[in-house]
Amino acid sequence: MMLSNRDIAQIFCNIADMLEIQGENKFKFLSYRRAGETLAELPRSLQAYVDDGTLEDIPGVGKAIGEKIRELLATGKLDFYEQLRAQVPETLLDIMRVNGVGAKKAKLFWEQLGITTLAELEAAARDGKLRALAGMGEKSEQKLLTAIAALAQHGDTRMPIGKAKPIVERILAHLLTLEGVQEGALAGSLRRGRATIGDGDILIASDAPAPIMHAFVTMDGVARVLAHGDTKSSIEHVSGLQVDLRVLPRAHWGTALQYFTGSKAHNVKLRQLALERGYSLNESALSPVGADKAMLPDAPKHTFDSEEALYHFLGLAWIPPELREDEGEIEQARAHTLPKLITRADIQGDLHMHTTWSDGKLSLREMVAEAHQRGHRYIVITDHSQSATIANGLSVERLLAQQAQVRQLNAAYGDSFHVLHGAEVDIKADGTLDYPDEVLAQLDFVVASLHVALTQSRAQITQRLLNALQNPHVDLIGHPSARYINERPPVDADWDAVFAMAQRTGTALEINSNPRRLDLDAPYARRAAALGIPLAINTDAHDAHMLDLMDYGVITARRGWVTAEHVINARSFERFMAWLAARQPAV
DNA sequence: GCCGTTTTCGGCCCGACTGTTTTCAGTCG
């Protein structure tokens, strides 16, 4: 079985950790880590890059790492990695997952005390054996035990944005009520809209940081204080999420917000650009540097109270946070060719939602009213099809009965709001659809989705998706990869083949807004959009609250460089219907 | 190990916080 991109990415991250433990040149192990992080986010299988000779075009992949990827794909193994594993116990990598333990400490514990596993480390800390080591004391032993307990309780998996964002937004709202707070914002991966969040970053502008820091570390919901300084504090929230707060003077807002929004790769590139122009960039200012890169003490520093001013000073257009991943955005900002990304305000309809007819929580009438209240111009009711018995899927008879009710409701709303009738049709394990063509033909809009047999082989999954795409009645593939973040991996499909077919048939692909799904994920959405495949951003709502989750889909689309032109439900009702009509098979 | 609109060699972002130190190393983002 061929190694997945994520398998290979993990191997390079492990190599990076092992080389770091060995004390290897830091730029060398950082190269492996960077490659690992990049490979995990690629929108195509590595084999596809090998096949068309573009492997070394991937940023961070050069001759040496390229060769290692080829070896892994061809043989499933890597000689270099096997040799490394013979020298460094792999269980040391578990020890490095503990907060506060890096490569140097892991090496120290291993070499001085023979510790190679988490259990051994915990026992040694409990027995007071660590305090004798250089740089260690009683306090470090206690912190270590707390951190090991926290790791055991919460693990170190990243939290889905849908869970993390409300937590951090509540904390920010609390801080904004404090005296002396001039401005506040989310930063980090929350602001960039990543699907999962490592820790929550909050930025506050104030001239009096001390009372704000105090309020932060003593507020409700703090499980423990990780750091408490003048400008930076960190807490662990009872949910297990780490939240970092930075307080800075208002005059530094632009550089600070830019700096703490990241990503790291984007910031590194931006700093290089600043250096080329004779400045060193940090979170408070742009400072002139001399030819030898020494700071010029007397030269004036430039501060910026907005990000726009900072980017403009460096000769760049302002870059939306969602694009700041060093994926070409700096080059395009320089050339002023950045796309105008889609916004929530562009969305005119929602093409995927459920009612009590299948597994939704609200009646048809209630769901339509809730969607109408949220300002949509049109919606499609898409309950589950008959084989989805657990979800109370609709028989053909019930489907047609529902259609009659949808038509009545639609008529009652008049011309300013349109209720269309569709279905979310299962793509069954054998690759056929769950309603016959003559039934599909009676629907206004058909979503086809994978819900069962998700662990089939790549060939089978791919064929099922290709079948659905080739059915002229199918307008949209719902949540194409069927992943649940942190719960269930995406299906194994040949996405190059799937996208090529969608491009040919003009079938739309969904960006599902449910924060458990966010599917298509951003790198795939970017690739689909670049191929001209129509996209739809839908909530897949099963209750009223879920109708409000559209923002998560929009931010995912923005991370995929998607513009309103790519998105069929960002069109007026007339243009949406025209798109649908053009898709209908000639009668 | 990667990379190049001054470079194919010589760079590779920068600072806060902590715990251990008497001026700093390790970790983190």
Image (spheres, rainbow, N blue to C red):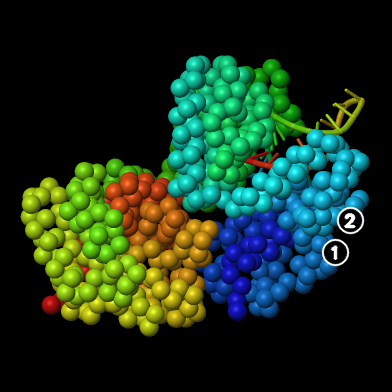
Q: CA distance from mark 2 to mark 1?
A: 14 Å
Q: Amino acid at mark 2?
A: Gly
- Front label number (2 vs 1): 2
Q: Counting residues from the N terminus, which is met first, the one under dot 2 or under dot 1?
A: 1
Q: Residues within 10 Å of mark 2 (few under 14, many from 20)?
A: few
Residue annotated with mark 1: A87
State the residue in front, A144 or A256: A144
Helix, strand or loop under label 2: loop
Left or right: where A537 falls relative to A333? left
- Residue for badge 2: A114
The crowd level at tag 1 (other Cα within 10 Å; few <14, some 14-19, many 20+) is few
Question: Which quadrant holds residue A406?
Answer: bottom left
The answer to whether the residue labelled 2 contacts the one labelled 1, judged by CB atoms less than 8 Å apart, is: no
The structure residue drawn at horizontal position 70% and vertical position 51%, both measured from the top left corner, is A97
Instruction: Name which residue lies at 23% across and 63% down.
Output: A357
Query: Is residue A533 visible from the viewing direction of this image?
Result: no
